[in-house]
């Protein structure tokens, strides 16, 4: 597939792809400086960023009776002109959700590889945000989750899409090595200042994919040495994993988790109840923390079925010696219900939004102590 060559433009561009030609033509009529390309696989509209905002495409799509599926992305003008529009179109097709239907799965692999290359080329731009996790019983801070935020101006991506692209292209270990090193370097710069002011050490949670834990770079002794080299202690770090990919050797992963916990690391299984982290997986890994997926937490204050499910998780956690942490708490009623269910830890916008520097959690009336408890080390 080739696009007609055009002179290099200094104005940033966006590209929209859809199989609904009438929708794209209607949109093109409202885009100043747009170029319409009709291809066998669909119709492409390329135009200046200022003329193709998300709201305009959504408005035209909403007005169409066909409810068209489409993808709208930025064109990366740092790529060679021969590649940039093909990569952008492949990314738009992927975003539309129609890649498999039109036989562009192979192109999706190319897009993801290009996207990761772009991600790694911007190493100095990406940022880390810190979201507080509280002890629900006391309302006090327990630790911070370190959230990696990609900054990719020409091709905006969430960290979830970056991680998935890395998994799909067998670059998950490369991504995790970079993210862990970046996070530890950042914590290693801010934590000494915090402690020098007479404060107690803070705890941090760092995300990894399970397969990375089987790589020598994340062997317990090696990871412990990396943490100590940053001036930190493994006892103040929790490793979080989501089972997004199959692990060929559960036994090896069990041994690695046991070794990590032996030298002081906490270990959390993320997204419990979301279809990834099964009871069988959790039971085999024996984590110190089970994170309940936000979809279960949302609305739990008025949902008997969700409350029953969390009760099962609480009972299960007690049997294997794991603490429960509820993600995505946004409503006071949900926090109250979680407290009544004796879920130990909580995280969400109600308790504190991610910040570029660790900030105290929000005080809520629902997070008042219900009983005294000695803080646990997990």
Image (cartoon, rainbow, N blue to C red):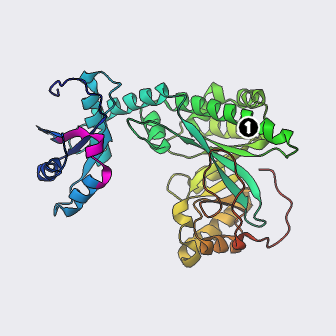
Instruction: Please state the horizontal and vertical placement of residue 143, each as a whole percent of the image.
Output: 73, 51
Compare residues 34 and 257 and report the one nearer the observer.
Answer: 34
Q: Quadrant of residue 5?
A: top left
Residue 32 coordinates in the image, percent (x, y): 19, 44
The quadrant in which residue 60 appears is bottom left
Residue 195 in view, yes or no? yes
For this rendering, which residue is in front, 323 or 70?
A: 70
Element on which disc 1 rests: helix
233 relative to 315, above or below: above
* Residue located 54% across and 65% down the image: 296
> Quick check: is 377 in the magenta stretch?
no
- 205 above or below 182? below
Q: Answer whether residue 97 is visible to the viewer in this image.
A: no
Give how far across and how far down residue 74 sits, in percent: 33, 38
Residue denoted by label 1: 190
Q: Nearer the viewer, residue 130 or 337?
A: 130
Q: In the visual, does 4 lie left or right of 181?
A: left
Magenta-highlighted residues: 44-55
Residue under the image location 55 percent in, 78 percent down: 302
**Rendering coords of residue 246 (x, y %):** 50, 41
Quarter placement of the N terminus: top left
Residue at image position (14%, 53%) is 26
Query: How many numbered circles are shown?
Result: 1
Is the residue marked by circle 1 packed among few (<14), some (14-19), or many (20+) residues within 10 Å?
Answer: few
Left/right of residue 185 with respect to residue 149 in the rendered view: right
Question: Is 48 inside the magenta-drawn segment?
Answer: yes
Left or right: 176 in relation to 235: left
């Amino acid at each position: 597939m080739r696009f007609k060559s055009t002179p290099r433009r200094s104005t940033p561009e966006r590209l929209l792809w859809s199989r609904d030609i009438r929708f794209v033509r209607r949109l093109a009529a409202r885009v100043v400086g747009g170029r319409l390309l009709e291809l066998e696989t669909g119709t492409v509209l390329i135009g200046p960023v200022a003329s193709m905002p998300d709201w305009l495409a959504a408005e035209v799509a909403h007005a169409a009776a066909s409810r068209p599926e489409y993808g709208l992305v930025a064109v990366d003008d740092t790529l060679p002109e021969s590649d940039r529009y093909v990569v952008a179109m492949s990314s738009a097709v992927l975003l539309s959700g129609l890649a498999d239907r039109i036989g562009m799965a192979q192109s999706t692999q190319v897009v993801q590889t290009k996207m990761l290359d772009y991600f790694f080329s911007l190493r100095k731009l990406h940022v880390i945000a810190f979201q507080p996790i509280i002890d629900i019983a006391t309302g006090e801070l327990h630790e911070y989750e370190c959230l990696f935020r990609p900054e990719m101006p020409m091709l905006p991506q969430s960290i979830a899409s970056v991680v998935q692209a890395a998994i799909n292209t067998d670059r998950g270990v490369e991504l995790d090595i970079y993210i862990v090193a970046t996070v530890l370097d950042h914590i290693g710069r801010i934590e000494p200042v915090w402690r020098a002011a007479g404060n107690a050490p803070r705890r941090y949670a760092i995300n990894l994919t399970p397969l990375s834990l089987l790589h020598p770079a994340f062997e317990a002794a090696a990871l412990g040495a990396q943490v100590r080299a940053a001036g930190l202690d493994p006892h103040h770090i929790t490793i979080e994993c989501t089972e997004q990919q199959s692990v060929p050797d559960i036994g090896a992963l069990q041994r690695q988790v046991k070794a990590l916990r032996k030298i002081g690391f906490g270990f959390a299984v993320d997204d419990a109840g979301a279809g990834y982290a099964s009871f069988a997986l959790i039971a085999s890994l024996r984590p110190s923390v089970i994170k309940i997926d936000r979809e279960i937490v949302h609305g739990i204050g008025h949902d008997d079925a969700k409350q029953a499910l969390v009760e099962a998780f609480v009972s299960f956690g007690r049997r294997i010696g794991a603490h429960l942490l509820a993600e995505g708490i946004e409503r006071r009623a949900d926090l109250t219900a979680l407290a009544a269910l004796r879920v130990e830890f909580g995280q969400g916008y109600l308790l504190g939004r991610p910040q570029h520097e660790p900030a105290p959690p929000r005080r809520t009336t629902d997070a008042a102590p219900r009983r005294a408890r000695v803080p646990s080390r997990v």
